[in-house]
């Protein structure tokens, strides 16, 4: 319920911001709803008249043309492409326009700066989708003060209470990956996580532990390792696993982005995947199909997650209560060529 189609007047989000109310409250005033306090109605009406907001004639079907922002960590990652695809399709169905921006931009001096708050404010965005590792407390406060509705997509850490988010079923995915390796006959199974404090990695590792416990298999502390999500970091951690007196015959890697480093470490010891060690990833990024051997991995439904987040944001923008504060979508194991039964002889 933004400005009328073809109008060059202010959006409803701008009106709400100027009046110090939420977009849903401003919408109620525009549409003559009675559940608004008299003082609030007076304040919003004054802003509507001052800014020249064009009301629709009664009986005209609403044509949402509101702008929503999608803020991603980086514009050149495989994750961002999948998220944009899902958000754009859902926005098209809802009649919304999506503006995409990177969380950090490089200034003329070469420094990385956070520019999305200023852009959001200038555009009068009606809502925001965030696909970031996390937001800072000050950024949550900035959004709350301006009454801008927002939803997090796949947050790495737990958001504050009441903040809506959409994520993958990380525990389920970690358990499915480990059960696959156990089903092939592996008993010495290690796990490589990314950021140790990340909730999503914690869920994946917890799923791994549950599968191992259910099968009655021990989890030596040396088999659980964390590091940065990069090829170099994964190569170092995998090298540490291969240096153990009793190295694993399989490894569950909590991010596909780490798998090339794992492959490099294995090949650097004269070993082969999956003959000597099986590897399972998580994400199902495009590289999972291109890498050799093709990676068995857990598919994270990023496009579907973005679409679900957009639908939740739309409810918030229209004053509805979302069906759930946290939504989890199911993962699926994609079996390819990087897993096989273990050799009888040790590595």
Image (cartoon, rainbow, N blue to C red):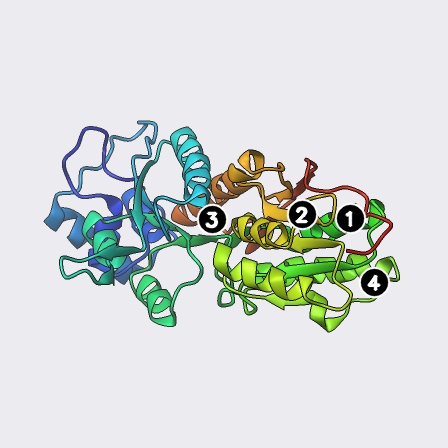
Residue 271 location in percent, x, y?
68, 49
Q: Give the residue number, with chain letter if any, for mark 4.
A: 213
Q: Decide: marks 2, 4 in contact (CB < 8 A)?
A: no
> Which residue, given by chain and number where applicable, does mark 3 sit on?
320
Q: Quadrant of residue 139?
A: bottom left
Query: What separation in Å lies between label 1 and label 2 (alpha carbons)?
Result: 8 Å
> Horizontal placement of 6 versus 329: left or right?
left
Pick whichever, 94 or 79, lies toward us: 79
Q: Any mark on residue 181, and which? A: 1
SS at badge 3: loop
Which disc number belongs to residue 74?
none
Location of residue 99 with respect to 204 vertically, above or below: above
- Circle 4: is it few (<14), some (14-19), or many (20+) Cα within 10 Å? few
Nearest to the observer: residue 242 or residue 257: 242
Q: Of helix, strand and loop, which one carries label 1?
A: helix
x, y percent for residue 36: 35, 55
Tell me what residue is drawn at x 29 percent, y 61 percent: 146
Dots 1, 2 in contact, CB < 8 A: yes
Instruction: Measure how far apart labels 2 and 4 are at the Cα level.
Output: 19 Å
Q: Nearer the viewer, mark 3 or mark 2?
A: 2
Residue displayed at 56% across by 38% down: 291
Name the residue that disc number 2 marks.
280
């Amino acid at each position: 319920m933004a400005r009328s189609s073809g109008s060059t007047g202010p959006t409803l989000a701008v009106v709400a911001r100027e009046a110090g109310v939420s977009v849903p409250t401003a919408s109620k005033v525009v549409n003559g709803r009675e559940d608004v306090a008299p003082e609030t109605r007076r304040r919003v009406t004054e802003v509507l008249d001052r800014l020249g907001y064009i009301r629709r004639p009664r009986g005209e079907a609403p044509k949402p043309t509101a702008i929503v922002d999608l803020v991603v960590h980086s514009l050149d990652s495989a994750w961002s492409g999948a998220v944009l695809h899902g958000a754009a399709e859902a926005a098209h169905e809802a009649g919304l326009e999506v503006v995409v921006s990177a969380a950090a931009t490089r200034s003329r001096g070469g420094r990385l700066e956070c520019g999305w708050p200023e852009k959001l404010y200038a555009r009068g965005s009606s809502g925001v989708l965030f696909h970031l590792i996390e937001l800072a407390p000050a950024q949550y406060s900035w959004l709350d003060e301006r009454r801008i509705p927002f939803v997090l997509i796949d947050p790495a850490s737990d958001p504050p209470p009441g903040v809506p988010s959409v994520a993958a079923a990380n525990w389920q995915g970690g358990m499915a990956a480990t059960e696959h390796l156990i089903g092939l006959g592996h008993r010495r199974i290690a796990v490589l996580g990314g950021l140790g404090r990340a909730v999503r990695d914690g869920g994946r590792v917890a799923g791994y532990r549950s599968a191992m416990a259910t099968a009655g298999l021990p989890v030596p502390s040396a088999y659980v390792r964390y590091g940065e999500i990069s090829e170099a970091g994964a190569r170092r951690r995998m090298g540490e696993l291969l240096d153990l007196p009793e190295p694993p015959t399989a490894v569950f890697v909590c991010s596909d982005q780490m798998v090339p480093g794992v492959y490099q470490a294995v090949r650097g010891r004269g070993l082969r995947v999956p003959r000597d060690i099986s590897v399972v990833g998580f994400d199902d990024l495009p590289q999972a199909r291109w890498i050799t051997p093709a990676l068995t991995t857990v598919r994270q439904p990023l496009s579907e997650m973005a679409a679900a987040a957009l639908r939740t944001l739309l409810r918030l923008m229209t004053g509805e209560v979302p069906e759930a504060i946290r939504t989890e979508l199911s993962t699926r194991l994609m079996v390819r060529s990087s897993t096989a039964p273990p050799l009888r002889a040790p590595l």
